[in-house]
Amino acid sequence: MACLVKGEKVWGQVCNHQIVRVQIDACGVSGQEIENENFQFVTGSNYDIRNSNTSINVDAVSMSGFQPPGNSLLNLLNSRVGTCPSGQIFVDPYSAPYNGIIPAESMVLAFIDNNPIAFTSNNLGYLCGQSKIFVIKGISHNSFAMFINKANCPAACNRTINITLGSCTYAIIYNGNQLEDVNGAFIRVDNGRVMYEPSDGCKPDFLPCDKPKFIIGNQSPNACASSGYELPEMSDFFTGNAMYFSGPGRTGTAYAIGKTINQSMTLYANDSHSCNPTATANENNLQ
């Protein structure tokens, strides 16, 4: 059985984030499930986690506000991945180089409790080589579980999960009776539909770490500064963060695509994404 996921669009606001997974029947022993409830979403544009309204509620249970994950949680999760050539997979979006800005096309893992236990499979090595996963946690502790499991469902067990990201609220309707009665059962959201999944050991979802290609259209190396030169479009960028910079690695003065320049300079076409936040490897220069 599948249920539609409804997004509430606010005038003037593009609701382009995507909820991908909700850990309904969290892993862990009895009495500790609350501390492992979580959901995951993918950012459709840069997401300012410090200044955006981020909240979740189901019936009378809610969590309004999230905070940095803390080193102990990150160290635990990264220890289950092991050592990766690309560095740690689980990262804190509040710390440098992100400083509260989660890049577009990034995976976010949101633990609802303020002191999560993070029961997952002890082997998360499959994440090595994939994109970063940005981790956040709630600002307080709930005395009651956010989600209802099959074992606790009455005959009619429809529930609506409202997740607010910025100015947009995403409503996910699920029925606990459709879940398997097992720790780790979850719902996956794909193309606007809810699918009921058995346990996978509460393993986090990830995004492939693809690097954008550089294709700069209408490039004119001999453009005359006196007549002005409009910075051309770039294609095959995954994140929407593509801009020109006067210095490498997204340093110096930023120039938006389409801006007219009237002086001779070297500019660096650069796209930032969660695999490489400064994107020096994903950079071409335009002289």
Image (cartoon, helix red, strand yellow):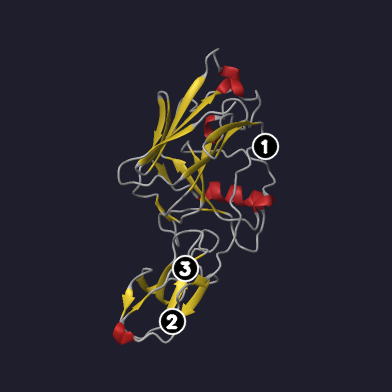
Q: Residue at x 42, y 45 (%)?
A: 67
Which badge, 1 or 3, is on the more N-terminal residue? Answer: 1
Tell me how far mark 2 sits from mark 3, CA to CA: 14 Å
User: Depth check: 193 or 129 in front?
Assistant: 193
Do labels 1 and 2 touch, CB within 8 Å? no
Which badge, 1 or 2, is on the more N-terminal residue? Answer: 1
Q: Which residue is mark 2?
A: 220
In the rendered image, which quarter is residue 64 located in? Answer: top left
Tell me how far mark 1 sits from mark 3, CA to CA: 39 Å
Q: Which residue is mark 3?
A: 234
Q: Amino acid at mark 2?
A: Ser
Do labels 2 and 3 touch, CB within 8 Å? no
Q: Amino acid at mark 1?
A: Asp
Tell me where residue 205 appears, x and y as whole percent.
Answer: 60, 45
Nearer to us: label 1 or label 2: 2
Q: Amino acid at mark 3?
A: Met
Tell me how far mark 1 sits from mark 2, CA to CA: 52 Å
